[in-house]
Image (cartoon, rainbow, N blue to C red):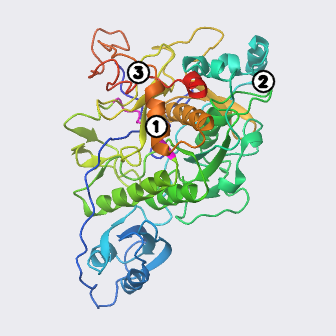
Amino acid sequence: MTAPLARSRTLRRSIAVPAGMAMATALAFLPNVTASAAGRAPQAAPAATSGPSLSYVVNVRPGAGSSGVQKEIAAAGGTVVIAYDKIGVIVAHSSNPDFAKTIRGARGVESAGATRTAPLPAQSTTDVGTPKALTAAQVKAAAGEATAGQDPLEPLQWDLPAIKADKAHEKSLGSRDVTVAVIDTGVDDTHPDIAPNFDRAASANCVSGKPDTTAGSWRPTAAESPHGTHVAGEIAGAKNGVGITGVAPGVKVSGIKVGNPDGFFYTEAVVCGFMFAAEHGVDVTNNSYYTDPWYFNCTDDPDQKALVKAVARASQYAEKKGAVNVAAAGNENYDLASDKITDPSSPNDTTPGGRVIDPSKCFDIPTQLPGVVTVAATGAKGLKSSFSNYGQGIIDIAAPGGDSTKYQMPAPPAVSGLILGPVPGGKWQYMAGTSMASPHVAGVAALIKSTHPHASADAVKALLYAQADATPCTDPYDIDGDGKVDAVCEGGRNKNGFYGHGIADALDAVTK
């Protein structure tokens, strides 16, 4: 088998290849990683300022107020960007190389850590390739295949019938009272497939860690990734006679931009994204990324432990406020339930160094946090995508994310095994990865919420799993047909490491 698709350094769930690609993960259990307060005041000596300016999260007791700790941050050479007192997370900047060590000793501080290894702003890195948009001829050809009631490009969307979304749309398109937040690289709300369903009130730019609601702040620039726009269209592309159709074309979608201009998703931005979604009545969040710069954050490292705690608090706060958090499982063909994993890409904002991590102590966030729905990807033949991460007890559910046409080619009139979606500039292109699988599940969750408007986040998740089409292990899994097993699935028909509870079912979401 060929090597797993290289994951984008930032678009955790989305890798672009000549036709696009994507990624993500999630655990059912996370040990308590809250450190007890040391009860000591920081050293009185003047804070050094000779190091590079970095961003930090400082975790304190939720709801207790943080004015005292904010004074200690200043004394340690830090500047507070924002304090999320409801979850006890403070975002700060400092050029004191000993800032984290010093502030960890302050009274009331439970943990603290640098959110990056590159200075502010992050260094520029080589961007991933961008797939080509559909040509006018391709759009015209697809429209010629469309039947009554289909949007012009829907014949190319093999992924909709794969989860019975086409049949679901005959019953319901979803409720305008439901909003799905795309926490991602930004969303182009001017795209004709997205504009009719866009929720401006629930949109913002969270890159700094503090929400900016200036009109259009949530949009990607021309130089930034189209990933978030593609994801938004997969979820709620309008059924309006233009382009593609989303899984839930009647619900609203918002954009919460957390990817910076260099494509990094740092902890302070992710925390801000969840908090903004929580405070603006969002029903579902989609998270097709991993939190940079660490693919896995290890709780035996004081910096990384603080990042896990901060993002966990934010995601759990969003869930308590009613949001179902959905995330991609990742694109490295890793068995996330194994005893050890080699992580060659961390930290990805300076110089990555190969390391072997213990999955019981090291987590991909937010996808391996408690309560998060972890989504694996399937291809056009309904098999685990060649690149999709997997793992018994880790994967909750599966959905179409696409695969190489060498492995899983759809039936005509579809022409690509990847997933078609909108991109900025009123265009459409193919991408693939668990980044694309996650929004399919987010769309189904939105349909469930539309059918059961008073259901809690836990109730929506329970229905999502109960309604999934149970899918047994693919055994043996030899996706490239070379006679060698490419991944081993564990578990039974109703719950296993490849497909979790099964493949998401949009028709059941609107009828049961």
Q: Which residues are magenta?
A: 324-333
Q: Can residue 264 be seen in this snapshot?
A: yes
Q: Secondary structure at mark 1?
A: helix
Chain-order first, disc 3 or disc 2: 2
Identify the residue position indicated by label 2 in the image. Answer: 136
Mark number displayed over residue 201: none
Q: Secondary structure at mark 2?
A: helix
Residue 291 horizontal/vertical position (percent): 42, 51
At x 41% / y 56%, what residue is drawn?
311
Viewer-closest of 1 and 452: 452
Chain-order first, disc 1 or disc 3: 3
Q: CA distance from mark 1 to mark 2?
A: 40 Å
Give the amino acid type for the residue marked by disc 3 in the picture. Lys
Nearer the observer, disc 1 or disc 2?
A: 1
Q: Residues within 10 Å of mark 2 (few under 14, many from 20)?
A: few
Identify the residue position indicated by label 3 in the image. Answer: 384
Mark number displayed over residue 461: 1
Q: Secondary structure at mark 3?
A: loop
Viewer-closest of 158 and 417: 158
Residue 315 horizontal/vertical position (percent): 45, 53
Q: Residues within 10 Å of mark 3 (few under 14, many from 20)?
A: many
Chain-order first, disc 1 or disc 2: 2
Q: CA distance from mark 1 to mark 3?
A: 22 Å
Nearer the observer, disc 1 or disc 3?
A: 1
Give the amino acid type for the residue marked by disc 1 in the picture. Lys
Q: Quadrant of the N terminus?
A: top left
